[in-house]
């Protein structure tokens, strides 16, 4: 089932959580709402579920205006970050809850409920835990039970609010893959909220990047990673070194230094981004490139990470460079050494703060 | 409880704390209560039986325990409502209301009794309207109930409040998103979580109501066979220097209260086990 939100606006006092947002979630896709905390992604999810009322705008479920319908009638499955399992019920009763709450006329028989619950528990591979209480389960197990419980009522859409946010890194990785497989089996339109870019890029068919209650970019994981539309997206997806300067035909002037790297015809005041692995260290105190001084060299397995402080015009800025451990420089760099940085690839955006001034 | 744990603990050990607990409990609770039974045992069995089963005394048991149970039940329902409003809603003067709840704890019970009597007497503010309707509150069993409800109010509110504060609204949202109606959510999701606290509050309110004296004697009217509470029977025996008779009735009251509280505790433990929480 498709979900559309049209011109959704929501404010909490002076804080605008959703700023006139319009979005389309096509049927059957697994979409990630990605953004920093406070960007409005959870609010959007709650508005779609009907747990929060938008100040204005409409939510369409399958083309029908659902803005004024109650959560109960929207048939959405909602999974909470902290599971929200009913502590006083067994796993079985938790999953059966939605079925047992149905009006008597359409409520399945107890035998039918039993069959269905076991089917769902098998789907989440936890059938053997049916008689346990939530307190006796691990976090990952609880979240899978919460998902089974949401699926029991055959929701038209599945909404997951930071579903792996409370889990440790290893379980989180497992559950991500598991969620992806589950979605490939069920094909239920799903939206999940996350602030973890790796999670979004790994699991979702599509990523919606949000910031300050607005959508920054929508696209497949590859698109948003390789062609970030805004400086925010570039900075949010993966580590980035940021330079501010003036771009002209000759290159990007950053103070007295000039970046001669290729740039996409952007002129004027710009923000340039370089990924840590696309930045070269040159062992000259003077010459081309950004002046910097090495402050720390860290060897992390196959990678050597170099942390640097800007010198001269870029003093006070921090830069990160990643070198393969096999790189000729990797072993010889010393903290305190003055160097220059030269990017191999730069991504340039007009600087929104100073645009027009130049 | 067979053996003190040998693991090093941060706080003083098991032996010391158990010893202190038992000594303290003995000094403060057990020895005075034992004195009651020893005093009562100075009566012959027959005299004891006569003292505790006199018709007036029997009527007083019924009034005392019946009204205490009823008052505790009323306080459970309305205490829950009050706690709910205090936890879930924001309104002007909330702090004030919160403080008012504790007032029945702080007020000397005799003052409460006099105030309630003045209010509900035939010429009182409320009594003057109720009595023409045939509702006689002051100087009758209903007055006893009113007084017991008044003094028992804080117990349920104060036991339920912290549990309600800890109850995530997410649970209710989860229930609603699964299709549960308001009543179903309350009945199947909220109530089971609150139940232990409600029962503790009920037990406390009941225990307090059974032993209440000061506020009740003013409003009860103390009509023999109709509105005499058991503590009053004990006092009247004491006034006649019949110490043994007084302690006999007191011991019956103690045993009955103890059994009731034990039953409530047992019920709670049973429920906790059934719900897989503690133990």
Image: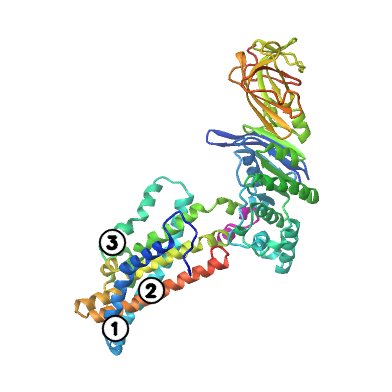
Q: Are marks 1 and 2 on the same chain?
A: yes
Residue stretch in magenta? B174-186
Return the residue at label 3: B112
Q: Chain letter for mark 1, please.
A: B
Question: Measured along the vertical axis of the image, is residue B185 above or below residue B138?
Answer: above
Coordinates of residue B30 in the picture (x, y in percent): 33, 71
Residue at screen point 32% across, 85% down: B53
How crowded is the residue under tag 1: few (<14 C-alpha within 10 Å), some, or many (20+)? some
Mark 1 → mark 2, Cα distance in angstroms: 19 Å
Question: Measured along the vertical axis of the image, is residue B89 above or below residue B72?
Answer: above
Q: Are marks 1 and 2 in contact (CB under 8 Å)?
A: no
Return the residue at label 2: B257
Q: Which mark is residue B89?
A: none
Q: Chain letter for mark 2, please.
A: B
Return the residue at label 1: B41
Mark 2 → mark 3, Cα distance in angstroms: 24 Å
Residue at screen point 34% across, 76% down: B253
* Left or right of A153, for residue B232: left
Image quarter of residue A305 = top right
Instruction: Please tell me which residue lies in front, A293 or A32.
Output: A293
């Amino acid at each position: 089932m498709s979900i559309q939100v049209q011109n959704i606006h929501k404010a909490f006092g002076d804080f605008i959580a959703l700023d006139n947002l319009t979005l389309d979630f096509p049927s059957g896709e697994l979409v990630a709402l990605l953004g920093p905390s406070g960007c409005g992604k959870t609010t959007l999810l709650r508005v779609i579920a009907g747990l929060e009322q938008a100040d204005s705008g409409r939510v369409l479920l399958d083309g029908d205006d659902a803005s004024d319908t109650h959560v109960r009638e929207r048939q959405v499955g909602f999974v909470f970050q902290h599971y929200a399992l009913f502590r006083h019920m067994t796993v079985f009763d938790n999953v059966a809850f939605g079925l047992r709450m149905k009006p008597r006329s359409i409520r399945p028989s107890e035998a039918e409920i039993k069959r269905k619950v076991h089917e769902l528990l098998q789907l989440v591979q936890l059938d053997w835990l049916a008689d346990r209480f939530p307190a006796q389960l691990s976090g990952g197990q609880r979240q899978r039970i919460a998902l089974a419980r949401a699926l029991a009522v055959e929701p038209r859409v599945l909404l997951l609010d930071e579903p792996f946010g409370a889990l440790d890194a290893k379980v989180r990785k497992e559950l991500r893959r598991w969620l992806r497989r589950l979605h490939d089996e069920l094909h239920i339109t799903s939206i999940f909220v996350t602030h973890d870019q790796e999670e979004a890029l790994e699991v979702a068919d599509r990523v919606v990047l949000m910031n300050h209650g607005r959508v920054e970019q929508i696209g497949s994981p590859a698109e948003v990673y390789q062609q970030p539309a805004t400086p925010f997206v570039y900075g949010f997806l993966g580590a980035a070194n940021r330079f501010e300067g003036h771009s002209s035909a000759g290159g990007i002037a950053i103070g007295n230094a000039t970046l001669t790297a290729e740039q996409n015809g952007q002129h004027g005041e710009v923000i340039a981004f370089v990924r840590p692995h696309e930045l070269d260290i040159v062992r000259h105190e003077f010459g081309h490139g950004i002046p910097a001084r090495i402050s720390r060299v860290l060897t992390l397995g196959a990678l050597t990470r170099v942390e640097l402080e800007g010198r001269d015009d870029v003093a006070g800025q921090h830069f990160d460079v990643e070198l393969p451990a096999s790189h000729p420089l990797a072993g010889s760099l010393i903290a305190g050494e003055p160097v220059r940085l030269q990017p191999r690839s730069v991504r340039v955006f007009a600087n929104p703060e100073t645009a027009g001034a130049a | 409880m067979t053996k003190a744990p040998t693991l090093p603990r941060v706080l003083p050990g098991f032996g010391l704390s158990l010893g202190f607990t038992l000594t303290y409990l003995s000094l403060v609770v057990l020895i005075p209560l034992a004195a009651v039974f020893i005093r009562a045992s100075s009566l012959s069995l027959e005299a004891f039986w006569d003292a505790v089963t006199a018709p007036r005394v029997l009527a007083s048991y019924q009034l005392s325990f019946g009204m205490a149970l009823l008052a505790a039940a009323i306080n459970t329902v309305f205490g829950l409502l009050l706690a709910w409003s205090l936890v879930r809603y924001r309104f002007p003067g909330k702090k004030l209301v919160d403080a008012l709840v504790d007032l029945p704890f702080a007020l000397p019970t005799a003052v409460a009794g006099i105030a309630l009597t003045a209010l509900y007497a035939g010429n009182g503010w409320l009594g003057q309207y109720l009595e023409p309707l045939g509702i006689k509150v002051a100087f009758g069993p209903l007055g006893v109930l009113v007084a017991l409800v008044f003094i028992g109010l804080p117990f349920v509110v104060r036991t339920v409040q912290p549990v309600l504060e800890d109850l995530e609204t997410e649970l209710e949202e989860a229930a609603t998103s699964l299709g549960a109606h308001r009543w179903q959510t309350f009945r199947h999701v909220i109530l089971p979580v609150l139940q232990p606290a409600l029962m503790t509050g009920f037990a406390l309110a009941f225990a307090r109501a059974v032993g209440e004296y000061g506020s009740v004697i003013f409003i009860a009217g103390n009509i023999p066979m109709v509105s005499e509470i058991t503590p009053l029977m004990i006092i009247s025996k004491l006034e006649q220097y019949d110490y043994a008779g007084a302690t006999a009735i007191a011991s019956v009251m103690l045993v009955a209260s103890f059994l009731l509280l034990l039953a409530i505790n047992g019920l709670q433990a049973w429920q906790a086990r059934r719900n897989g929480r503690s133990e």
